[in-house]
Amino acid sequence: MIKNSFIRSSLVTKEQKGSVESQVCYLTNRIIILTQHLQLHRRDYSSQRGLWKIVGKRKRLLVYLSKRDILRYNDLISQLGIRGLKTR
């Protein structure tokens, strides 16, 4: 069985539960959980669709944050250990 690994965010305080950083952290945790689930259940297409929706939502939030404040964006992706957005 795959061990659960969650990202504990020091970003989430009581006042900041709705911030972009906390939302991205929450979505990243859900992506990790669903990825582990799909490694065990490869033909679970409804969970696969949910994963793609969550990835899309996280991507939209990261695009928003990169346009608003690039320093917060760079700090967030380095803390979470995710790749940055593709630039054209």
Image (spheres, rainbow, N blue to C red):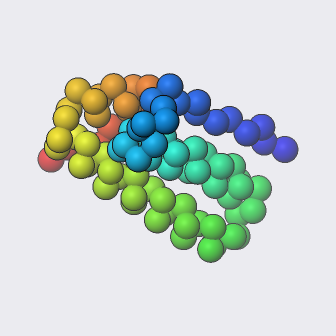
The residue under the point 64% across, 36% down is 6
Q: In the image, is residue 57 above or below residue 3? A: below
Query: In the rendered view, does 50 fall on the left or right side of 70?
Result: right
Outermost residue toward the bottom? 46
Measured as percent of width and height from the top left, residue 71 is found at 23, 27
Q: How many discs mark residues in the rendered view? A: 0
Query: Quarter of the image holding residue 70?
Result: top left
Which x, y percent locates residue 72?
28, 30
Between 82 and 42, the residue placed more toward the observer is 82
> Where, quadrant-wise, is the N terminus in this rendering?
top right
Residue plotted at (50% across, 49% down): 27
Direction from residue 19 to residue 8 in the image, left or right? right
* Looking at the image, residue 57 lies above or below residue 84: below
Position of residue 73 in the picture relative to residue 88 (left or right):
right
On the image, the x and y values in percent for residue 37 come to 71, 55
Question: What residue is drawn where x is 78% and y is 42%?
Answer: 2
